[in-house]
Amino acid sequence: MQKYDGATDLLNSAIESIKHVFSRPMQVEAPHLFEQTLIQSDIGVLVGIVGDMEGRLIIEGEGRIFSNLSQSMYGMPLEGEMLHSFVGEMANMIAGNTSTLLSNRGRHIDITPPTVMVGKLQMYGFSRGIRVTVHLEAIGPVNTILLLQA
Amino acid sequence: MTKILVVDDAAFMRLMLKTILSKNGYEIVGEAENGQDAVEKYRALSPDLVTMDITMPVMEGVEAVRQIKLIDPEAKIIMCSAMGQQTMVVESLQAGARDFIVKPFQEERVLESIRKAIGA
């Protein structure tokens, strides 16, 4: 059976979820397409997506931005392992809400537990990627990245 | 004092729930980071109520609910998940969960659900 190719639908749902999870003013940049390599500068979280649409969702940005975000959302600036856990849970919420939004439109995906990646690294093993940078007011930029195999 | 077992694979979310529950007079008797750990801790600690995540490694939350209900059919379990689609809610309730809270949650939503589950 042919897979549903809904990268745009998936990305739009992820952006919609970000707006819901962060619940703050933000500016969303236009999508940027890239191929072959993704370079992470500081902290990223990868969530696998399977079902009607398959790929990997990555939320990526600087540790100080995520720490500011935890201060703003939960009243506590985090660091170290607790900051990494916060970033992982944040990505889990975004991916989980994305799956709910898609489900409401008749598309079904499942998600893996988040994998938190710390430090500068390069990622390979995908055919194309889409990055959307979201600028959270008074916080800073966070990248939403969708890696696709086909 | 109502004894609560907090189950979530994210240390941050366990910290958030523990903070909310402790300051509102609940006793956190234990925490678990996956479904299998939750089943073992339920057996050992006999909590009055469990908050249960769904997407976790080793054993996911809905299966943990089923196994806990085999140990104690009267177990009070509240799901606390980012996966809020209808099928997930229905599956959780059919497994025996009392309520379903979608993350991100408001503090009052959690407290209201717990009060309702324990009949306070």
Image: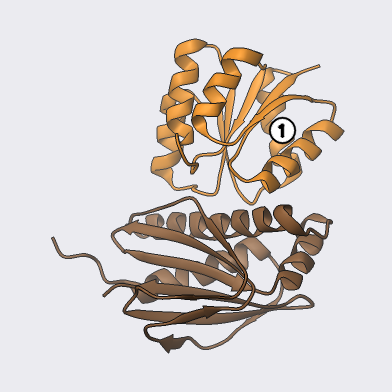
Q: Is residue B69 above or below residue B30?
A: above
Look at 33% across and 55% down and name the residue there: A108
Q: Is residue B65 above or below residue A114?
A: above
Q: Answer few, some or many: residues within 10 Å of disc 1's Cα (few below 14, many 20 plus, some between 14 and 19).
A: few
Q: In the shown orientation, is residue B116 left or right of residue B90?
A: right
Which residue is nearer to you in this view: B115 or B62? B62
- Specify whether residue A110 is in view: yes
Residue type at mark 1 is Glu
Q: Is residue B42 above or below residue B93?
A: above
Look at 50% across and 39% down and name the residue there: B54
- Specify whether residue A107 is in view: no
Figure chain in brown = A
Q: Is residue B90 above or below residue A70?
A: above
Which residue is nearer to you in this view: B96 or A87? A87
Identify the residue position indicated by label 1 in the image. Answer: B112
> In the rendering, at what x and y percent does residue B16 appear?
74, 44
Element on which disc 1 rests: helix
The image quarter in which residue A65 lies? bottom right
> In the rendering, at what x and y percent does residue B85 appear?
44, 48
